[in-house]
Image (spheres, grey):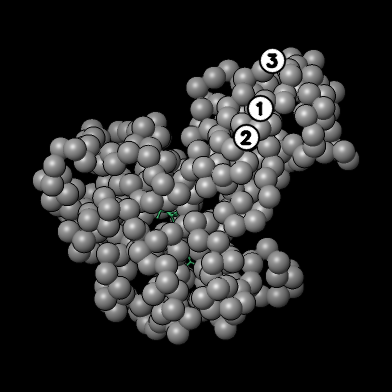
Amino acid sequence: METKLWNIDQGKEIYQEAAELLRSGETVAFPTETVYGLGADATNPDAVKQIYEAKGRPSDNPLIVHIADAKQMQEFIAEVPEKAEKLMEAFWPGPLTLILPIKPGVLAESVTAGLKTVGVRMPVHPVGLELLRITNRPIAAPSANRSGRPSPTTARHVEEDLSGRISAIIDGGSTGVGLESTVLDVTSDIPVILRPGGVSTEQIEEVIGEVRSARNIPKKEEVPKAPGMKYTHYAPLAPVYLVEGGAAFWDKQIKRGLDRGEKVGLLLSDELAAEIREPVMKIKIGSRAQMDEIARRLYDGLRLFDHTDTTLILAETFSKDGIGDAVMNRLEKAAGNKYLNETSELPR
Ligand code: TXA
Ligand code: MG
């Protein structure tokens, strides 16, 4: 299949053409404020199937449905709890996905992977929002990457992963937040954060009080989970290790890697990069004091290694405050939770 590439500078007509493709059951990748999404009509099973096929996504991992107007939810959501109303008021349009109970029979079953709930979000990016408004259908849209890869923050990233596998891509430049939306289950009395993201726990608690984090809930308790969080994710081709320690510790781990014959690459802040002496490739993703920028550049940084001959990636760790929680969540998944610190150094 040939993938059309549109740029938003081509004018308003592209929205009509893209909406037409979506309404006729095809797939279109478009920018949101978090990452690029791969959209298809959420009410059309054949269209949704193309998303799973293009991404190579496991069929038990449900999709997020995107809307341009909260009224659209009446068609497919059974009930909106009061806390959800407050959150929509505070954060929509924006990077917050709410898990809500579905009205059966409207959305393709594959969207929810058979669950009785669905994730809904209204993006704030002008291009994504305008496309949704003109299409005027609920649009299922996971991140527009091959399953397991870092999510795309530019149209180039989408092309790398999906060119020839989807109908079109709308290039609207780099996304702003750079990490996916926060996924919050609001079907229980105390809502549960299933995936940290663009809206922080602190911001959510300011609006509705206490929330729980899926990872803090004891195993024996029955908890809702984001099925997607059990898969390996966000991973570049070379293995990633998270390094906890000062510059001297870093230099020691780098030397060990080099002694083993590895091509070592570093993913780190401007500050740490200035302290490392070993002459290896450094991909800098911004200042530690600007965690928003680290979030925005993280996936591009991870993807850059795939264009090099790096065989071992050492990545910096960051504070989990605010957006740092989402940054560390993605880094831990990219690394498969492999840490290097005083108790576990790189093997010689
Ligand atoms: O920022 C975002 O959310 C982006 C943009 C494109 O909107 N989309 C995105 O979709 O990240 P995706 O499919 O890559 O991630 C959706 C996550 C998965 O972890 C999935 O398991 C979870 O949301 N999810 C979806 N529906 C769910 C449900 N009914 N219950 C629990 N988790 C759900
Ligand atoms: Mg994804």
* SS at circle 3: loop
Mark 1 to mark 3 CA distance (whole Å): 11 Å
Quadrant position of residue 216: bottom right
* Amino acid identity at mark 2: Ser
Q: Nearer the viewer, residue 150 or 293?
A: 293
Mark 2 to mark 3 CA distance (whole Å): 16 Å
> Residue at image x 29%, y 79%?
74
The answer to whether the beta carbon of the residue marked 1 is less than 8 Å from any atom of ligand 2 is no
Tag shown at residue 279: 3
Picture coordinates of residue 59, whole percent (x, y): 46, 55
Q: Nearer the viewer, residue 193 or 43?
A: 193
Q: Residue under circle 1?
A: 273
> Residue at image x 53%, y 70%?
204
Whether residue 158 is visible: no
* SS at circle 2: loop
Picture coordinates of residue 136, whole percent (x, y): 20, 64
Tag shown at residue 30: none
* Amino acid identity at mark 3: Pro
Left or right of residue 74, residue 347 in this image? right
Crowd around label 1: few <14 · some 14–19 · many ≥20 (10 Å): some
> Residue at image x 88%, y 40%?
343
The answer to whether the beta carbon of the residue marked 2 is less than 8 Å from any atom of ligand 1 is no
Picture coordinates of residue 109, whole percent (x, y): 37, 66
Q: Nearer the viewer, residue 163 or 155?
A: 155
Tag shown at residue 269: 2
Mark nearest the camera among 2 and 3 is: 2
Q: Furthest-front residue in view? A: 289
- In the rendered image, the vertical position of residue 71 relative to residue 183, given as above or below: below
- The image shows a total of numbered marks equal to 3
CB under 8 Å between callouts 2 and 1? yes
Q: Nearer the viewer, residue 224 or 179?
A: 179
CB under 8 Å between callouts 2 and 3? no
